[in-house]
Each structure stands twice: as C-alpha cells, then as structure tokens.
Image (tube, grey):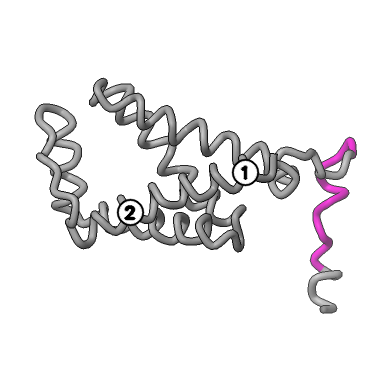
Amino acid sequence: MKIATIIARVLLGSVFLVFGLNKFLNFIPMPPPTGQAGAFFGALYATHYLYVIATFEVTGGALLLLGRYVSLGLTLVGPVVVNILAFNIFMNHQGWPPAALVAVLSLFLLWRYRDNFAGLVRDTAPRSNSLHEHVAAPAAIATH
C-alpha cells in the first residue's frame, strides 16, 4: 500500500505542478473552450483569478511531489479538485475521464492520510445544557 500511495502522490503532484505552471508559462498550448466553458475561463483570465488557482495548484503539487507536508498539499488542491469535477460535470462533459482520475487519486490520498484530517470531523465541543457556561465572564477577561 505504501508504493500505491507514493505512485498516487507523485501522479497527482505532477498533474497539479505541470498544469499549474502551464497557467503561468503556457508551455502546453490548448485551444480555448467555447460556449459557457469559454465564458467561464474568459472571466478567470480577465480577472486574473486563474493565477490564484494556479498558485494553489503549483504549491500543492510541489508539496505532494516532495512528500513533505502532504496533508497541506492535499488541503490546497482539494478545492481545485472539486472545481475541476464541477466544471467537467456542468460545462465540459468531454473532460470527465481526467477529472475522475484526479478525484480518485485525491480521495485515495485523503483516505491514506485520514489520521491527519480526523480532527476536522471529530466532535470536540464540550457538552452542556447552557451556552452561558462557556462564555468567559467580563471580569475574568479584564484580569488577564
């Protein structure tokens, strides 16, 4: 399973690093999409928001490739994966196979690193009957 994790991490990291850098350097020329997809990408380019997305892709992809701070890398590329899936479901139906592959690799890695994300889904709030028991008294705040 360790080898599968390394393969998935390198593949996903490579995809995000290469295609993120391509948004800055345009070394893989791609024809512009048409229709709603074209309008969507046109807005991303015109507002320079695509560079924000590319920064997350490059940073997350590099962290995945390096094998350091993998959970942070997955956190950075996670919203991008969701948007890739949504874009290909709603606007560009031809691109779903690569989108599905990226999603499967991401989900596999999230599962492999699930212990690092466990705190996000754990209920750690204290139990009580009254909200006022957990609110600090003004006098206690003033003494600090």
Q: Locate residue 134 relative to residue 105 in the image: left or right.
A: right
Give, as a three-letter code, the residue at label 1. Answer: Thr
Q: Secondary structure at mark 1?
A: helix
Residue at numbered disc 1: 5
Q: Residues within 10 Å of mark 1 (few under 14, many from 20)?
A: some
Q: Total number of numbered labels?
A: 2
Which residues, given as a range, are shown in magenta? Answer: 128-138
Q: Locate residue 105 relative to residue 132 in the image: left or right.
A: left
Percent of width and height locating residue 92: 23, 25
Q: Residues within 10 Å of mark 2 (few under 14, many from 20)?
A: some
Q: Secondary structure at mark 2?
A: helix
Percent of width and height locating residue 55: 36, 60
Q: Quadrant of the N terminus?
A: top right
Corner quadrant of residue 93: top left
Q: Residue furthest bottom?
A: 144
Q: Residue at the location (23% across, 61% down)?
A: 24
Q: Residue at the location (44% across, 61% down)?
A: 59
Corner quadrant of residue 108: top right
Q: 92 or 12, which lies in front?
A: 12
Give, as a three-letter code, the residue at label 2. Answer: Val
Q: Residue at the location (24% across, 55% down)?
A: 22
Residue at numbered disc 2: 18
